[in-house]
C-alpha cells in the first residue's frame, strides 16, 4: 500500500464526524467494496447503502414477461447479457422459458447480436437492451449498424434508463453518493455539479482498491466541512465533458420516455426508447406486442433494498427461499446485485 | 453486465480496435473515440471502447489525495 492509500485508510478509520449514509449507486462498487473488505474499515457512524445502479436489478418483472412473449409467441431468438436470463418474470425466468422451447442466447455485446442476425437471415434476433448511459450507446451502435446494412431481422426490446431523474427520486436517501464512474465516463460531470448546486453531495469513484479508498476518504473529509461537495476521484477515465460522440449517437437513435424502475415505480423521462425513424428496430412495434404488466413476488423486498430503505438481510426470504441458485428477486441474480453481494460476502 | 474492462489497444482499423486485456484479445468498436492509436489504454463496455485511460490508478489516487490534504 502506498503512502497516499495509507493516508486515505487512516482518514476512514479515524473518522469521528457526524453519522453518514453513503449510497453506492453502482452495483459493481457494492461488490468491489465487499470483495476488498473496505466495509470492515468503516467506523460505526458511517453506513454504506446500495442504490439502484444495477441495470438488471431495476428492470421490472414485466420486461422479462415481454421477452418471454417474444420468444414463445413470436419465435424470436432472444439475445441478452447473461445475468438477465435468471431474473424471475411473473411466471418464470427466461431460463424457464427455455424449457418450453424458447431460444435464449447470452451475448457480450449488442454488436454480437447484430452478427448473429447477419449469420441467421431466416431468424428474428431480438436484443434485450437494458442499462444506463454506459451501455445504451452500444445498443444504439447496433441499431445504426443494422440500419446501414439493411438488416430486417434485428430489433431491440428496450428498457434503457438514465440516471439524472433517478437521483431526483433518491434525493434525501443518503448524505453522499458514490457516483457510478462509467456512467460519468459517458455523461460527464455536469450532472454532478448541478446536484451539488441543489445541495446533493457525492464523488465520482473508480473501482480499484486505491480508487475506492480515496473516494471514501474524500467524502469523509468534505462531509466534515458541512458544505455540499462534488469531487471527481476517477479523472483517469472520467472527463468533465464525458464522451460527446456517444451522447450524440444516443441522441440520433433514441429519445427520453417515462419508464418503470423496479422498486421506484415509474420515473418520468428517465428511460430511453427508439425514435420513430428507427421503429422497424423496436421489437414492441415490429411484433405488435400487447400491453404486458408483470406481477412481482410480494415476498421480495428488492424495491426497498434498491432505495436503501432496508438491507438485504432484513428481507425474510433472503438466504432462505432466495439464494443465487434460486433467486426470488433480481438483486439476488446479478453479480452486481446488493442481495447477491450480501449473500456472497456474508453481509459484513 | 456493467463491468468495464480496461485493455491495451493493439491495432485500429475501420472503426474496429483489437484490444488486449491481460492476454485475452478481442475486437471492439472504436467508433466512439477519436484518435485512438496502438498502445493507448481504453475502458471497454459491452464491446465498445468508451473512454481512454490517461494514467494509472495509483498516480490518480496520489493526485486526488494531494488536492484533498
Image (cartoon, rainbow, N blue to C red):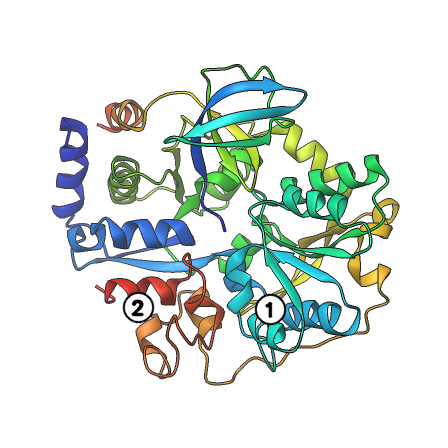
Task: Tell me if A275 is positioned left or right of A263 in this view.
Answer: right
Chain letter of the residue beneath label 1 in the structure image: A
Q: Please give the chain letter of the residue carrying mark 2.
A: A
User: Where residue A347 sits: x, y (%)?
Assistant: 25, 66
Secondary element at image label 2: helix
Q: In the image, residue B53 lies at what x, y percent?
A: 43, 24
Residue behind mark 2? A343
- In the image, residue A233 sits, relative to residue A267, either above or below, namely above
The nearer-to-camera label among 2 and 1 is: 2
Are the residues under marks 2 and 1 on the same chain?
Answer: yes
**Which circle marks residue A164 in the picture?**
none
Q: Nearer the viewer, residue A228 or A276?
A: A276
Name which residue lies at 36% across and 33% down. A233
Residue named by callout 1: A60
Q: Quadrant of the N terminus of chain A?
A: top left
In the rendered image, residue A133, in percent from the top left (x then y), is placed at: 59, 44
> Is label 1 in a helix, a strand or a loop?
loop
Q: Can you say which quadrant of the picture contains the C terminus of chain A?
A: bottom left
From the viewer's side, name the closer residue of A257 and A277. A277
Per the model, the C-alpha gap separating discs 2 and 1 is 22 Å
Q: Is residue A192 left or right of residue B61?
A: right
Would you say residue A189 is visible in this rendering? no
Amino acid at each position: 500500500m502506498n503512502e497516499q492509500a495509507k493516508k486515505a485508510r487512516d482518514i476512514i478509520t479515524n473518522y469521528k464526524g457526524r453519522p453518514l449514509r453513503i449510497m453506492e449507486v453502482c452495483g459493481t462498487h457494492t461488490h468491489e467494496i465487499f470483495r476488498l473488505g473496505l466495509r470492515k474499515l468503516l467506523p460505526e457512524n458511517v453506513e454504506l447503502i446500495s442504490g439502484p445502479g444495477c441495470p438488471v436489478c431495476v428492470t421490472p418483472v414485466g420486461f422479462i414477461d415481454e421477452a418471454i412473449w417474444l420468444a414463445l409467441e413470436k419465435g424470436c431468438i432472444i439475445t441478452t447479457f447473461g445475468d438477465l436470463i435468471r431474473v424471475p418474470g411473473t411466471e418464470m425466468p427466461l431460463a424457464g422459458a427455455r424449457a418450453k422451447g424458447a431460444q435464449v442466447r447470452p451475448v457480450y455485446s449488442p454488436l454480437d447480436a447484430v452478427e448473429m442476425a447477419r449469420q441467421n437471415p431466416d431468424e428474428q434476433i431480438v436484443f434485450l437492451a437494458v442499462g444506463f448511459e454506459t451501455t445504451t450507446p452500444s445498443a444504439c451502435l447496433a441499431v445504426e449498424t443494422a440500419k446501414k446494412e439493411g438488416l430486417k431481422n434485428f430489433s431491440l426490446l428496450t428498457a434503457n434508463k438514465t440516471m439524472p431523474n433517478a437521483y431526483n427520486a433518491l434525493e434525501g436517501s443518503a448524505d453522499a453518493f458514490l457516483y457510478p464512474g462509467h456512467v460519468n465516463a459517458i455523461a460527464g460531470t455536469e450532472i454532478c455539479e448541478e446536484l451539488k448546486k441543489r445541495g446533493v453531495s457525492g464523488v465520482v469513484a473508480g473501482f480499484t482498491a486505491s480508487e475506492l479508498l480515496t473516494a471514501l476518504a474524500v467524502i469523509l473529509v468534505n462531509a466534515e466541512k458541512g458544505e455540499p461537495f462534488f469531487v471527481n476521484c476517477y479523472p483517469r477515465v472520467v472527463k468533465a465533458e464525458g464522451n460527446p460522440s456517444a451522447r450524440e449517437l444516443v441522441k440520433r437513435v433514441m429519445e427520453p420516455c417515462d419508464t418503470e424502475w423496479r422498486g421506484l415505480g415509474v420515473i418520468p423521462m428517465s428511460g430511453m426508447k427508439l425514435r420513430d425513424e428507427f421503429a422497424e428496430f423496436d421489437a414492441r412495434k415490429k411484433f405488435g406486442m400487447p400491453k404486458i404488466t408483470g406481477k412481482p413476488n410480494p415476498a421480495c423486498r428488492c424495491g426497498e433494498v434498491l432505495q436503501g430503505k432496508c438491507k438485504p438481510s432484513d428481507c425474510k426470504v433472503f438466504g432462505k427461499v432466495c439464494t443465487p441458485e434460486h433467486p426470488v428477486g433480481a438483486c439476488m441474480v446479478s453479480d452486481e446485485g446488493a442481495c447477491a453481494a450480501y449473500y456472497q460476502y456474508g453481509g459484513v | 453486465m456493467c463491468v468495464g474492462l480496461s485493455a491495451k489497444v493493439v491495432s485500429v482499423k475501420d472503426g474496429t480496435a483489437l484490444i488486449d486485456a491481460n492476454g485475452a484479445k478481442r475486437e471492439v468498436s472504436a467508433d466512439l473515440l477519436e484518435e485512438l492509436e496502438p498502445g493507448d489504454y481504453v475502458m471497454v463496455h459491452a464491446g465498445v471502447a468508451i473512454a481512454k485511460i490517461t494514467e494509472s490508478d495509483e498516480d490518480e489516487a496520489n493526485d486526488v489525495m494531494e488536492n484533498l490534504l
